[in-house]
């Protein structure tokens, strides 16, 4: 029976956040972002192992308090790009997973993932031939900008979705997709698509937003406050 493993790329610098520490180590309701992320997977009975991928030079991880979890492993295998970090992580775990096992890749910078949403993703995809990802249908009108930051076109938004994570694919397929991709995919699904496969879109939630800019953390803090779900 296929098992479920989580890979958490956490080797980014958070340059757009402009904080003193990489954003995965910033505080949200008394815990760092990465602690929130680990907690949701640690509490899920569907998840067998959790793999944190960090940089060799990371000076923050050691001070991250975590209760001991037999599921958790840390790999010092960060790369220059998110896709490179994930591929390094897949290589690092090759001796402990089966080809058919499911891998869920989740950003360390998405601390708002709920247990309910995680279960919905797994339940929807566990019998799927390809796998897929959480995503949100686009709500705003889309504009393309010219060089002068004036609108050069309005892009039809029908059928457009914003990709979230987790993104869930079979180990062997994901590794092949990332290893063979020409260039740098910005998410796992893009690499899978390049194999000619069609990942399934599973509707996500606003609270699963990626903390990228300082205002994202403000919004998320308020959102979790209002939902009393910290
Ligand atoms: N070389 C990289 C780049 C990113 N990530 C991780 O991928 C996730 C999403 O990436 P992003 O939001 O782009 O994070 P950063 O690269 O840290 O941010 P920025 O692009 O603003 O520098 C984060 O959990 C980040 O730590 C990673 O593991 N390795
Ligand atoms: C994977 C991702 O979170 C999907 O929205 C996103 O693409 C990662 O962002 P990045 O800035 O490209 O690392």
Image (tube, helix red, strand yellow):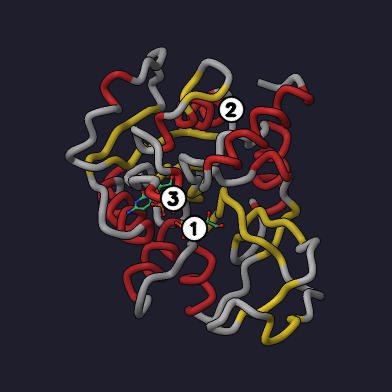
Quadrant of the drawing holding the C terminus = top right
Q: Is residue 90 above or below residue 24?
A: below
Q: Nearer the viewer, mark 3 or mark 1?
A: 3
Q: CA distance from mark 2 to mark 1?
A: 19 Å
Residue at image location 44% in from the left, 29% down from the top: 26
Residue 16: image x %, image y %?
Answer: 44, 50
Residue 132: image x %, image y %?
Answer: 62, 60
Circle 3 sits on which residue? Answer: 16
Circle 2 sits on which residue? Answer: 45
Q: Is residue 170 above or below residue 111?
A: below
Say whether marks 2 and 1 touch (CB < 8 Å).
Answer: no
Residue at image location 65% in from the left, 80% down from the top: 150
Q: Is residue 134 above or below residue 222?
A: below
Q: Is residue 186 left or right of residue 111?
A: left
Give the SS element for disc 1: strand
Residue at image location 35% in from the left, 20% down from the top: 64
Specify which label sits upstream in the sequence, 3 or 2.
Answer: 3
Specify which label sits upstream in the sequence, 2 or 1.
Answer: 2
Residue behind label 3 places its C-beta within 8 angstroms of ligand 1: yes
Q: Which sits in the foreground, 214 or 55?
A: 214
Residue 126: image x %, image y %?
Answer: 64, 51
Circle 1 sits on which residue? Answer: 170
- Other-residue count near label 3 (Cα within 10 Å), few / some / many at <14 / 14–19 / ≥20: few
Residue at image location 34% in from the left, 76% down from the top: 180
Specify which label sits upstream in the sequence, 3 or 1.
Answer: 3
Q: CA distance from mark 3 to mark 1?
A: 31 Å
Give the SS element for disc 2: loop
For the view shown, which residue lies furthest in the front direction? 148
Q: Which sits in the foreground, 82 or 122?
A: 82
């Amino acid at each position: 029976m296929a098992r479920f493993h989580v890979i958490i790329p956490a080797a980014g610098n958070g340059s757009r956040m402009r904080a003193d520490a990489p954003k995965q180590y910033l505080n949200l309701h008394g815990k760092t972002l990465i602690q929130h992320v680990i907690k949701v997977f640690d509490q899920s009975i569907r998840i067998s192992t959790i793999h944190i991928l960090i940089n060799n030079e990371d000076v923050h991880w050691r001070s991250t308090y975590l209760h001991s979890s037999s599921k958790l492993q840390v790999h010092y295998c960060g790369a220059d790009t998110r896709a490179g970090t994930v591929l390094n992580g897949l290589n690092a775990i090759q001796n402990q997973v089966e080809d058919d096992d499911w891998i869920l890749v989740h950003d360390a910078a998405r601390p708002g993932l709920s247990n309910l949403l995680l279960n919905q993703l797994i339940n929807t995809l566990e019998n799927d031939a390809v796998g897929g990802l959480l995503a949100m249908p686009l709500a705003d009108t889309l504009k393309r900008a010219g060089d002068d930051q004036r609108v050069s076109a309005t892009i039809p938004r029908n059928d457009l979705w914003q990709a979230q994570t987790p993104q869930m694919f079979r180990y062997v397929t994901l590794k092949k997709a990332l290893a063979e991709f020409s260039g740098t995919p910005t998410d796992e699904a893009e690499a899978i698509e390049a194999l000619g496969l069609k990942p399934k879109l599973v509707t996500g939630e606003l609270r699963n937003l990626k903390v990228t800019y300082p205002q994202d953390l403000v919004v998320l803090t308020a959102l979790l406050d209002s939902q009393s779900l910290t």
